[in-house]
Image (cartoon, rainbow, N blue to C red):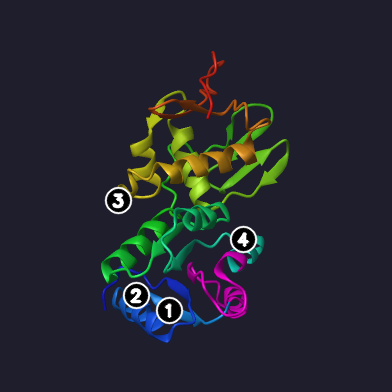
């Protein structure tokens, strides 16, 4: 059996037996463990009982739809979620991402695309070893500990999802330098996402909402228009702020 999945467990939530079987066969072939649920209610029960490493969540389901299920999942877990749907509308895709989905696959999809997307999302949960293991005091209100995966704002622990934390990691490790859009997308989401700038804009906004005193006037995560993003150089007194998005 291939070892690509490293025995990670994926919960598949879909009420179509043929689709569930298709997903199960291809993920198990790549070494993943697969659990199944046919409703949003079952998915929440499985999430609590089995603690999967990822959820593949269909939008159209009989009891509560995938968007509502995703909202309930995000109340209790940061588990990576990929939305599955026959709809290809941009509005639906954006809605899923805004509710906390990590990715979005439109049916029909190939086995190769499925496994590639699953692997890419799981890679985002794996934070590289930081250069320095010491906690980082950005200023009097923001403290980051990459070893513990903790972020503190005004003395309160802030909950970051894996993708948010990995994005913050790459910004902070390059503090004072502009990191281009395509480089951030490749490092955080994977090389195949290097042109998906809407993912980056959305997650930069998530981080600003959680870290900045005023997200509309960011002091930590600055925008270099048309180029990329720069985390303020906290190792010296910052100069003039860049424009913000």
Residue assigned mark 3: 192
Left-right relation of 41 to 24: right
The image quadrant of residue 140 is: top right
Q: Position of residue 66 (x, y in %)?
A: 55, 69
17 w.r.t. 199: above or below: below
CB within 8 Å, label 4 to label 2: no
Nearest the viewer among 154 and 243 is 243
Cα gap from disc 2 to disc 3, whole angstroms: 20 Å
Residue lying at 44% horizontally and 44% vertically, measured from the top left: 198
Sequence order check, earlier mark of 4 and 1 = 1
Q: Which residue of the protein is positioned furthest toward the right in this rendering?
A: 155
Residue 170: say if magenta. no
Q: Residues within 10 Å of mark 1 (few under 14, many from 20)?
A: many
Residue lying at 52% horizontally and 58% vertically, measured from the top left: 96
Cα gap from disc 4 to disc 2, whole angstroms: 24 Å
Residue assigned mark 4: 74
SS class of the residue under badge 4? helix
The image quadrant of residue 33 is: bottom left
108 w.r.t. 71: above or below: below
Nearest the viewer among 149 and 238 is 238
Q: Which mark is residue 34?
A: 1
Give the magenta-colored segment's residue range.
40-68
Sequence order check, earlier mark of 4 and 2 = 2
């Amino acid at each position: 059996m291939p070892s690509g999945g490293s025995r990670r467990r994926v919960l598949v939530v879909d009420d179509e037996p043929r689709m569930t079987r298709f997903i199960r066969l291809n993920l198990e072939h790549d070494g993943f463990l697969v659990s199944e649920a046919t409703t949003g209610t079952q998915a929440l029960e499985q999430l609590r009982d089995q603690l999967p490493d990822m959820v593949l969540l269909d939008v159209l389901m009989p009891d509560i739809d995938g968007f509502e299920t995703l909202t309930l999942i995000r109340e209790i877990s940061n588990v990576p979620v990929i939305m599955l749907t026959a709809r290809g509308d941009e509005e639906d895709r954006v809605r899923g991402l805004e509710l906390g989905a990590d990715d979005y696959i439109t049916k029909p999809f190939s086995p190769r695309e499925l496994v590639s997307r699953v692997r890419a999302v799981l890679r985002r949960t794996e934070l590289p070893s930081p250069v320095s293991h010491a906690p980082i005091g950005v200023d009097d209100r923001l403290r980051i500990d990459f070893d513990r995966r903790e972020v503190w704002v005004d003395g309160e622990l802030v909950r970051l999802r894996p993708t948010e934390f990995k994005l913050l990691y790459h910004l902070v490790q390059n503090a004072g330098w502009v990191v281009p859009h395509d480089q951030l997308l490749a490092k955080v989401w994977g090389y195949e996402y290097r042109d998906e700038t809407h993912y980056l804009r959305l997650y930069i906004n998530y981080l600003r909402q959680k870290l900045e005193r005023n997200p509309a006037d960011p002091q930590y995560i600055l925008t270099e228009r048309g180029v990329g993003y720069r985390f303020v150089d906290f190792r010296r007194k910052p100069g003039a702020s860049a424009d913000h998005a």
